[in-house]
Image (cartoon, coloured by chain):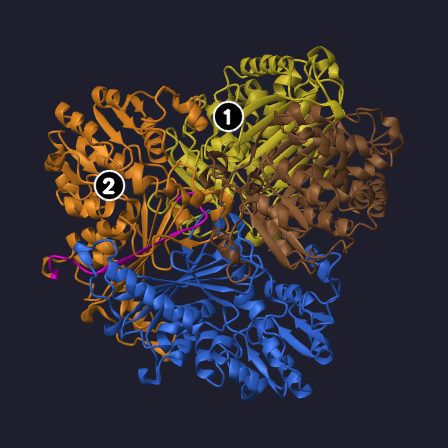
Chain colours: A blue, B orange, C brown, D yellow
Amino acid sequence: MIAGVIGAAGYAGAETVRLLSGHPEIDALILASVSFEGERIEHIYPNFLGKISAALVKPEDAAAGADVVFAALPHGVGEPYARTALERGIPFIDLSADYRFDDDEAVFTAWYGKPYMFPELRKWSVYGLPELNRDRIRKLGLGKKVIIGNPGCYPTGASLGAFPALAKGLAGPGTIIVDSASGVTGGGREPSRSFHYPECADSTAPYKVGCHRHTPEINRNFAAMSASGAGASGPAVIFTPHLVPMNRGILSTIYIPLTGSWQSTGGTSGAAVRPPSKEIEEKKGEIRDLYADFYRDEPFVRVLPPGFIAATNRVRFSNFCDISVHLDPGGTTLIVVSALDNMIKGAAGQAVQNMNIIFGFNEAAGLQAVPASF
Amino acid sequence: MIAGVIGAAGYAGAETVRLLSGHPEIDALILASVSFEGERIEHIYPNFLGKISAALVKPEDAAAGADVVFAALPHGVGEPYARTALERGIPFIDLSADYRFDDDEAVFTAWYGKPYMFPELRKWSVYGLPELNRDRIRKLGLGKKVIIGNPGCYPTGASLGAFPALAKGLAGPGTIIVDSASGVTGGGREPSRSFHYPECADSTAPYKVGCHRHTPEINRNFAAMSASGAGASGPAVIFTPHLVPMNRGILSTIYIPLTGSWQSTGGTSGAAVRPPSKEIEEKKGEIRDLYADFYRDEPFVRVLPPGFIAATNRVRFSNFCDISVHLDPGGTTLIVVSALDNMIKGAAGQAVQNMNIIFGFNEAAGLQAVPASF
Amino acid sequence: MIAGVIGAAGYAGAETVRLLSGHPEIDALILASVSFEGERIEHIYPNFLGKISAALVKPEDAAAGADVVFAALPHGVGEPYARTALERGIPFIDLSADYRFDDDEAVFTAWYGKPYMFPELRKWSVYGLPELNRDRIRKLGLGKKVIIGNPGCYPTGASLGAFPALAKGLAGPGTIIVDSASGVTGGGREPSRSFHYPECADSTAPYKVGCHRHTPEINRNFAAMSASGAGASGPAVIFTPHLVPMNRGILSTIYIPLTGSWQSTGGTSGAAVRPPSKEIEEKKGEIRDLYADFYRDEPFVRVLPPGFIAATNRVRFSNFCDISVHLDPGGTTLIVVSALDNMIKGAAGQAVQNMNIIFGFNEAAGLQAVPASF
Amino acid sequence: MIAGVIGAAGYAGAETVRLLSGHPEIDALILASVSFEGERIEHIYPNFLGKISAALVKPEDAAAGADVVFAALPHGVGEPYARTALERGIPFIDLSADYRFDDDEAVFTAWYGKPYMFPELRKWSVYGLPELNRDRIRKLGLGKKVIIGNPGCYPTGASLGAFPALAKGLAGPGTIIVDSASGVTGGGREPSRSFHYPECADSTAPYKVGCHRHTPEINRNFAAMSASGAGASGPAVIFTPHLVPMNRGILSTIYIPLTGSWQSTGGTSGAAVRPPSKEIEEKKGEIRDLYADFYRDEPFVRVLPPGFIAATNRVRFSNFCDISVHLDPGGTTLIVVSALDNMIKGAAGQAVQNMNIIFGFNEAAGLQAVPASF
């Protein structure tokens, strides 16, 4: 099978190329780039020397010649190639935000500042978070005429961390807070002051506080997973991203107010707060077990054993999302920590996972790397 | 004037030494250490070569010979030296948690696992957060017979970020969440697996989720600053620390539910969330002005101008705490970001600031360094 | 086939485990540890959760039950297990320095401070640098009764960088200088002050200048590769290691004085030095081609194309050693840069490569990972 | 006294501003920028908020209104402002390469690709390395009509490391190798791919091997310091810069072949190399003492005590250059390590030091900061 990658010169594209090069079902790659057409991928990424060698072609050529097309382009740029793929009846897996909101163009326009170019394409698209939409992905993918809106990196970590609590009715009426930290590869390959080494090394900095584009995607996912009784709009969610000096990884600390029946007695708070009581520890264990059960069959979600806390260095270079479950000493707020590699489960790995689902491959094909912790 | 520093070989101690060495009112230093007695400070910290030179003496000798004593020791170890200082009528500035809870020994014992050695010392002690207790510090310090409980690093950043909202009645009845990230110097000089370079480099990791010792200190400070009507126990606070790969700095992102009258109309949330409206931006500006006004006369708190977000690399090596004010798109939650250098405003700098207040020096003496941003 | 790993809890051991877990010829692992016997490997390295699961057994049990044994132990500790393996007729691949000097016990003793425990084992041992000793490894390995002295990380990078110049007679009579920088994983998993995050982050520091233990290994390798006419002692080599704030990688910059016939005319030096002339560039190209030719059939050495300079981030997580060839403006000194991942080609990967050679597997089996550059 | 800083928005300029803001003899600053004219310095560098506040003016205005002018501009751009300063009879301290080669325009042109704009300015210029040219700087500065060619960062570290050996005749006839590592601030404030965080974090990479512009400056300095008998062109020097993931600092490891009389007997080398003998250690001590003596009166050079090795984290944020002296086991090559903060002694601090010399201030005025080691 031949895979095409459009936008192969960018970080998400290059990571897709790296993963596909080791995929047992992929025989050849067609790599394309808008800005670097004609250059060789192994000269842009010398790490590929001796392993992957190709001249970057025009995006059209990738869309025309492959059996599946991945696109890692800026938002709003790849629609013509998606249309070509649809017409050819091959899957188009899009890593931009273009297909993350299905036919809800108003949301896309409000946050991304442009309308859909070909709104009708959304008839064939599905939001590609397997843990939410695996059945839809599979069903739509049967005919291969399908567009995947591959999820954003932050929404993936936030969603996987909150889903069990939302699905099982643990979340009470209050606001859910998602406080996240990202590695710098999340900003892509183009140099800019924000990602200039001396500006971000040895420092921690929030950005786009209260106005990051992943906010509506997280909110939508939470609403989708919540029990239907929760109302059309879903729970209120606040999301704050931070830039931390690491290459890869997203760590999300998620604060979910528990509904009354899930709250623990024996909690303490305010000036009288005390270390977690036995009741708190027990309730925490109970919720952890519920999380573990929820994800029992998921190949890429690891609910950590008691005593472990999710951290980004445990999932590096893997498609895993690690989750640990905690409780505040008051027993009223569930604290979930999720960790993933923003370039893999947060981008390229999830894209390959979606391809695997569509084609009926082993869902973990090409994604078996054991993470290294150092 | 002669300053003594007990625990000079540790990070907080060495930083106190460095700051005092440039203090215009300090003529000489007596440096002491329990574990490194007899060694030379400039051999332990070769950065001091040619600038600071001293053999480390016994703690007793520092307490006996100085006009002011700083102690940067593990919790529960320094009480005998504090007693000596009290007897000699000289200020004792303690960087451990021993005097942070005044006579509330129950809190200390519950979280630090030991009782007070000499409970009666608390008659002379005061919690040394100048922005909360300047008048008490000054008054108690008049007779020089005073013990300062120098604040914890996290509580300093959390408190300064929340104080205006608490004092001015902006905070509503819900839980306040403090999500913080610390540089690795916060763990001190002793090697351990958690702070082993390959274990924490290039990674972000929460720790002690729901059970960190700074939790009661933050809660107590919030209660103390809240309007008296808030009830004895103060607002519920949840605190989560994270370790990030940087040397210095604490970044706190603080989520404060607004009371009804301070909430903004024109907010959006849930699946219908939209970018911040004009009303949100205006309300944000209003609250920022209130913050700026609250800290107008503080020498070391900078409420950032509109458009700026606090980050740790802007306060490096200074005694500043930077604060930026934000609002969620729903208009119901105030998001405050505070940044400080954990070794300076979070430890040694604040200790020197307390000395300055006690002795009637310019409060910024020895703390005038302009931060470098790279 | 069953592989045993003794010292699996250390960094080199854990990396060996990670590589073997994906090796197509390995069916099962027996993991052993002296210090952590009884603990589970996936609790020590939570990155392994869901992928590798085993209780650590006694070293004896690994030596007794496996078809090949890897040992990643401190120097001088693993000899009894090597003897057991020999007796059982299975290969023993040792990552310590115990078998790097063959029967030259005097060198080992002088630099490592202890004698051989069982000197007679060296009858069966071979220094496991495939690019130097592939034939000997293969021949000795035929009967499976073989001990591999897996090379040190620095000597691997230094040797691969200098070999072509030494073998082809480019090196003149002067001293060869090897200036190397290592990531912090090279110091192993045990915490110590040198590798405490705040002591090595954001800094560069040489160590053991003029007295590092890898010095005799580099010298011996250079002598072995030099034309026989070079004399028994080989060229004089100076080696300086530096610690730099990165997790993985060794970068060696190697200065080789060229013999007269290889020097370029048209060079400039001293106060009259000018940018490289055309002659210099041509000579550089000539030598690069010679290097490329020398390594033509090596699966893991990449001589970079003109215009590229070796860097550690291009070989991360791979078994590659990248080499780039340069010339000083004077045309008298060859400057070679080599880069490898100290945990892979510098330790665990090379060990697996040696196993592959011994057993006649594809030499790259289990070592096919494409390096990621970010 | 009023100081002007042209190019204040760049890293070297901003660091000059930071140092001058704390200088006891400077009453006011005029800050200028070509690219950011009209912007406020404290908005470009929010670390300055509350400490330094100024709108950036045109370069002409700084040159016209100040008592001393610093210029941190790209090479070849600042000559008109230098001329203005000369005409006004005020010192012009230039941080570019424009005046580092005095009237040797051919060198400048060969390496920097352009001719001098106003060659006649060199009549008034002097290379501003105080440890080499203090007397000339003082003498030329007497009339205030003087231009300082502030040294490059690498040449400062290389020169200070080699000067005693060159001046005292220790260096033999062979090539001196300078192998250096720099922090990323050395690349300046403008974003580019080389300094994009994910491209340089967690990696070590040489660059411009055999062709870096600081090569002729180092060669010239070595020739200038060498005994006159060494010949016009001075010793041959090879210089290789490396980029390492740290913000500040330059570490240079310098290999100097010893002349016969300074070589140690009792050395070992080649395959017979052994740990340093007693003779080697003694010779090392002797040379160290000679270095210490050479720099006895220098305020900013610290020759480290026996047992210490220079490292960049010991000089951070200070004007110190640390030097440690070592010997190879063969006793034929002196290995000197020098460390400095590239933004201070390597740029802004040295510029301020030059101002102090010219104006007869205490040479350490404004440069008294004690380095912090973490």
Residue B160 is left or right of residue A113, and the answer is: left
Q: Is residue C88 above or below residue D130?
A: below
Quarter holding the C terminus of chain D is top left
Label count reads 2
Rendered location of residue A4, percent (x, y) = 69, 74
Give the label, 2 or 1, closer to the camera. 2
Residue wearing tag 2: B97
The residues colored magenta run B230-248
Asked whether residue B24 is drawn in magenta, I would say no
- Residue type for callout 2: Ala
Which image quadrant for residue A169? bottom left
Residue D66, can we see it? yes
Rendered location of residue D212, percent (x, y) = 69, 39
Asked whether residue B238 is drawn in magenta, I would say yes
> Dot 1 falls on which chain?
D
Q: Are marks 2 and 1 in contact (CB under 8 Å)?
A: no
Name the element at disc 2.
loop
Residue D318 is left or right of residue D99, and the answer is: left
> Would you call the spot at circle 1 few (<14 residues within 10 Å), some (14-19), or many (20 or more)?
many
Which image quadrant for residue A138? bottom right
Q: Is residue B225 above or below residue A74?
A: above
- Residue type for callout 1: Lys
Q: Which mark is residue B270?
A: none
Rendered location of residue B364, percent (x, y) = 27, 36
Residue wearing tag 1: D144
Rendered location of residue C359, percent (x, y) = 76, 52
Q: Is residue C190 above or below residue A306?
A: above
Q: CA distance from mark 2 to mark 1?
A: 56 Å
Residue C59 is left or right of residue B310, and the answer is: right
> Would you call the spot at circle 2 few (<14 residues within 10 Å), some (14-19), or many (20 or more)?
many
